[in-house]
Image (tube, helix red, strand yellow):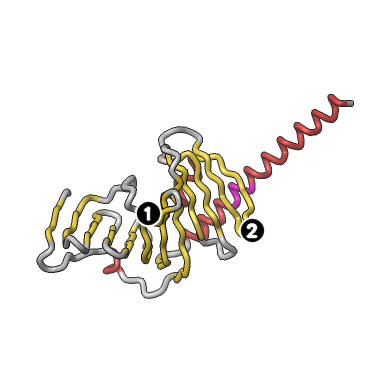
Amino acid sequence: MKSTSFKIFLLFLFITSLTAAESGEQLAKQLQNKFNSISYLTADFRQTTNGKVTLAGKFFYGKGNKMRLDLKNLTIVTDGKTSWSYNKKEKKVVISNYDATDPSIISLEKIINDYPSRCKLTLEKNGGANVLNLTPNKTGLSFKNAKIYINTEELIDKIELTDQNNSLIVIEFSNYQLDKNSNNSTFTFTPAKGSKVIDLR
């Protein structure tokens, strides 16, 4: 009798695990479908590392890995080919070729469309939010674990990344605006007159 009960328990665990994985994959697909239907968005942005605020400002996204971060003392811009990093205090801009692995570049396209295919996916619940839990299948990714908190509009509220050094990086988005006032000039940068320009291309 104990043996039968134990087998039933193991079967229940297997079915629960399988259902969670399928739900995680379904949630990832819903997120991808929503994200890939958006050509332009803006949001308020905040990033913390181990509980300490490191970045805060305005985030802009455009299709084709276009991104802009307007922060207090720093502006980071990429059009998917060229990246600009402008230090406002020093009046210095560094220009480089776009690099998706650059930690200063937040590639939503990579996070949403690439990472799930390279991870084990499970679904968690946190209050009213669905949480997509990503655990890399192999080494090669920059994180040990990632959690993507998805709201009822299928937009990302928060991303939690535990990196290889066990630091917890939290990226939060709020006050979304979708497909409004899209302008390609948002994703190019012309340094102010008199700025020091360092071109690494």
Q: Residues within 10 Å of mark 1 (few under 14, many from 20)?
A: some
Which segment is the magenta one? Answer: 23-27
User: SS at mark 1?
Assistant: loop
The picture quadrant where one finds residue 52 is bottom left
Amino acid type, mark 2: Gly
Above or below for 47 versus 118: below
Residue at x 38% of width, y 53% of height: 107
Left or right: 130 in relation to 57: right
Frontmost of labels 1 and 2 is 2
The picture quadrant where one finds residue 7 is top right
The picture quadrant where one finds residue 94 is bottom left
Q: Is residue 81 visible?
A: yes
Considering only order in the chain, which callout, 2 or 1, is on the residue closer to the N terminus?
Answer: 1
Residue 49: x and y in percent read: 41, 50
Magenta: main secondary structure equals helix
Which residue position holds label 1? 106
Work out which residue is located at the far bottom of the displayed protein and give it.
181
Amino acid type, mark 1: Ile
Residue at x 35% of width, y 56% of height: 65
Which residue position holds label 2? 127
Residue 180: x and y in percent read: 41, 74
Residue at x 71% of width, y 35% of height: 14
Q: Nearer the viewer, residue 17 or 161?
A: 161
